[in-house]
Amino acid sequence: MALAACGTPAKAPPAAQASQLELRLASGPYTCENRVSLQVEREVLNRATQRIRLVWNGNSYRLDRDPSYSGLPRFEDSASGLVWIDLPWKGLLLDSRSNKPLANECRPA
């Protein structure tokens, strides 16, 4: 059910963009279930994360903040189809093309 709320629906309406949550989450290495590891570096502007650099499977990706209906921080790279969702207790990497999780239960190492 948590994944359904974080999926890749249509863009949030402009009114929702003002109510986006800003969670103070770590940059650096993350470890995920099934021994998956990745690196998240946050680019902060005006006290809000605008973009992240994600290193995963030997490649580096730039994911831009994408307003979500839930207000949770959601970052997407449309070229690769990668989506990173920040939840207060974990991070989650999705493939927006298949709507399947690539890495789950990701926490700062």
Image: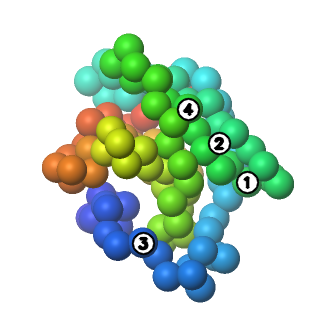
Regarding residue 87, the answer to whether it shows in the image is no
Quarter of the image for residue 20 reads bottom right
Residue 104, quarter of picture? top left
Q: Secondary structure at mark 1?
A: strand
Q: Eyeballing the image, is 69 above or below 91?
A: below
Amino acid type at mark 2: Leu
In this rendered view, identify the residue nearer to me: 80 or 12: 80
Determine the residue located farthest toward the bottom in the rendered image. 15
Q: Are marks 4 and 2 in contact (CB under 8 Å)?
A: no
Placement of the N terminus among the 4 image quadrants: bottom left
Image position, residue 29 (x, y; %): 54, 21
Report how far apart the C-alphas of labels 4 and 2 lie in the structure.
14 Å
Please name the amino acid that badge 1 sits on: Ala
Q: Position of residue 73 (x, y in %)?
A: 55, 56
Q: Earlier in the sequence, mark 2 or mark 3?
A: 3
3D distance between C-alphas at marks 4 and 1: 15 Å
Would residue 85 be seen by someone viewing this image from the given angle?
yes
Amino acid found under the numbered disc labelled 3: Lys
Task: Give the residue number, with chain letter if any, for mark 4.
Answer: 53
Q: Which residue is mark 1?
A: 48
Q: Which residue is mark 2?
A: 25
Image quadrant containing the C terminus: top right
